[in-house]
Image (cartoon, coloured by chain):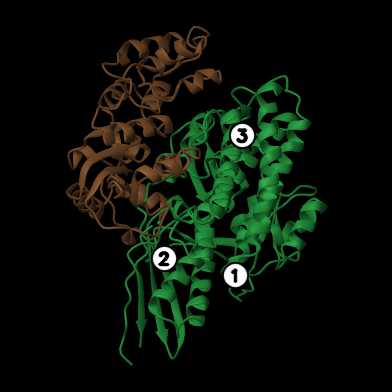
Amino acid sequence: MAERKRPRLAVWKFASCDGCQLSLLDCEDELLALAGVIDIANFPEASKAVEDGPYDLSLVEGSITTAHDAERIRTVREQSKHLITIGACATVGGIQALRNFADVKDFIAAVYASPQYISTLATSTPISAHVPVDFELRGCPINKVQLLEVISAFLAGRRPAVAAHSVCVECKQRGTVCVMVQGTPCLGPVTHAGCGAICPSFRRGCYGCYGPMETPNTAALAREWQALGAAPRDIRRAFRSFNAAAEPFLRESESHGD
Amino acid sequence: MATKTIRVDYLARIEGEGALDLEVSDGRVTSAQLRIFEPPRFFEAFLRGRSYLETPDIVARICGICPIAYQMSAVHAIENAFGASVGGQLRALRRLIYCGEWIESHALHVVMLHAPDFLGYPDGIRMARDHGDAVRNGLALKKAGNELIRVLGGREIHPVNVKPGGFHRVSHPRELLPVAEILKRASELARDLVRWVATFPFPDFTSNYEFVALRHPDEYPFNEGRLVSNRGIDVDIRDYDGEFEERHVAHSTALHSVVKRRGAYLVGPLARYALNFDRLPPPIQALAGEAGLGPVCRNPFQSIIVRALEIVYACEEALRLIAGYEPPDAASVPLTPRTSTGFGCTEAPRGICWHRYDFEADGTIRTARIVPPTSQNQPSIEADLAAVATAFLDQPDETIRDRCEQSIRNYDPCISCSAHFLKLSVHRT
């Protein structure tokens, strides 16, 4: 019997910490089975057997911060039937998008003795600012169970079942007592679900690493934070972290002084 | 003689992007430059103006493979700045979560990334067709380390529970008991792993490294100790700048660190092992002997054995810490910010990770400096590459490339902390 042709997967890295693609290798129980049903054709972090495209599915980690990478993402898109971004860097620009609020020359001078050796763009931008993206999986880092769901869904030709509600719903689902009512400022009410509401289960407020949920009321939450004693600078910092360039978080951070 | 160039498009199974240029003259490699293209992300720049409270969450994002290392060096630096010390069970819990990171990071590297080089496979997944049990056991080990991090930290990558002064919430002993059962099996798997990797074919290659690691009065080092070397360095971590300096070279976005008076040095498992062999429990020393290692190992290819030994150690140390665990009364010690400078240095799986912060009176960061392990090893990697390539110059270019890639992987470099695409250029004149 002829072997059925397996769909071909590629994993790409741009500016990032490698944590999201590591999530694939962190599927310790599923990795070998996954490799049986899909052809991991291009995954340099895991293999030196790199096969040419085209690919059925490309997973893209990281943001665009160099002119070279802005060109490279176009060639990735050309070779990919489906392109999915994995994580906050690829989806909204990541923590390195904090440069968007500063002069990148100052940033270079702060880190490097010889700025002339460094070639970088003034901004960190998401993949969708450069090429069409078929699905964006959120999180810093992504949740590996959601990653497997997204891969399975695309291979089956359906939309992934990834909820767009807030972290609050996940707290209710796991029975965690609200930390806000105990006086701890939390970004859970405006943050996209997916992590499983980990921070409140460790008695700390959510710090928004999955980015904004659908239609978040960030202004109302900022007022609650103020009522709990948060200074404007605390609120500005909270919205300006791993998803600082996501529109609702960006707008809210700008309404609070430093 | 004509100049010859080989191009290699990918340095696989390394986190990051880089290229290697070799200059060959009269049958010797005269220069090896590992060029790192990893786009700079400027952590030390955007940390300025952030609160000390945010620092562990931010610096974790430097590396998805060793976030605990960055979190730990940061919290120690913060506590050092504010004059606080974290002891007792909180200290034990920090050591415990670090054991988890060593186990998951080392197991990933030893089994999935490095072992395929020795056995002639492109990756761990293809290696599993012939060595199924070894790969499945390696993944089980990795999972055990990750489970420890998940229980203590909330998730494997960028865990959320570490904070300056301790933790947000400390574990209940009943949360740790199931992990202890997993670790008992992991410790057995790790011993088998040591015996398996010890049978690999190792090139006859040694280098006279200056090893640099932490040394603690009675422990194999994770979080604390003096900075020592086998050539006489023995300083407090705050005196790092007296002995070492970072240089910015044109061919890399990773800064290069050198010992001021001498040059290249080595951090990571070989250095820790050579400088702290006497701190390993006797059964692990005996296992090292069984695997053919003395108290010092200078063959970088055998670093795979040392990593496997460190997995055994981390499993045993974790079991010891869990057995002695009693939940502390408070999850953290109180901190009072002040205008100050603080230093932190801990042993990431791939070597020392050194941090220094200057704080304003309210705990806002004025300046930050972070020296990751890979930038410290880069001059040693380049020296090894020149020596390894020279030894293989009569071989086909394909062989030279494979040996160079393997040599780079000897260091388990996390080039994203400062590279996958190795473009190898050999210039023969």
Residue beneath the point at 18% across and 42% down: A131
Q: Are marks 1 and 2 on the same chain?
A: yes
Question: Distance between the Cα atoms at labels 1 and 2?
Answer: 35 Å
Residue A126 visible (yes or no): no
Q: Which residue is mark 1?
A: B201
Which residue type does callout 2 highlight? Val
What's the chain of the residue with tag 2?
A: B
State the CA–CA distance, disc 3 to disc 2: 39 Å
Neighbourhood count class around disc 2 (C-alpha, 10 Å): few under 14, some 14–19, many 20 upward: some
Q: As rendered, which of B128 and B393 lies closer to the eye?
A: B128
Question: How crowded is the residue under tag 3: few (<14 C-alpha within 10 Å), some, or many (20+)?
Answer: many
Choose mark 3 or mark 1, whichever is in front: 1
Q: Quadrant of the C terminus of chain B?
A: bottom left
**Chain in brown on the image:** A
- The disc placed on residue B148 is 3
On the picture, is A251 further left or further right than A236? left
Q: Nearer the viewer, residue B283 or A243?
A: B283
Residue under the image location 40 percent in, 54 percent down: B16
Of tags 3 and 2, the one toward the viewer is 3
The image quadrant of residue B248 is: bottom left
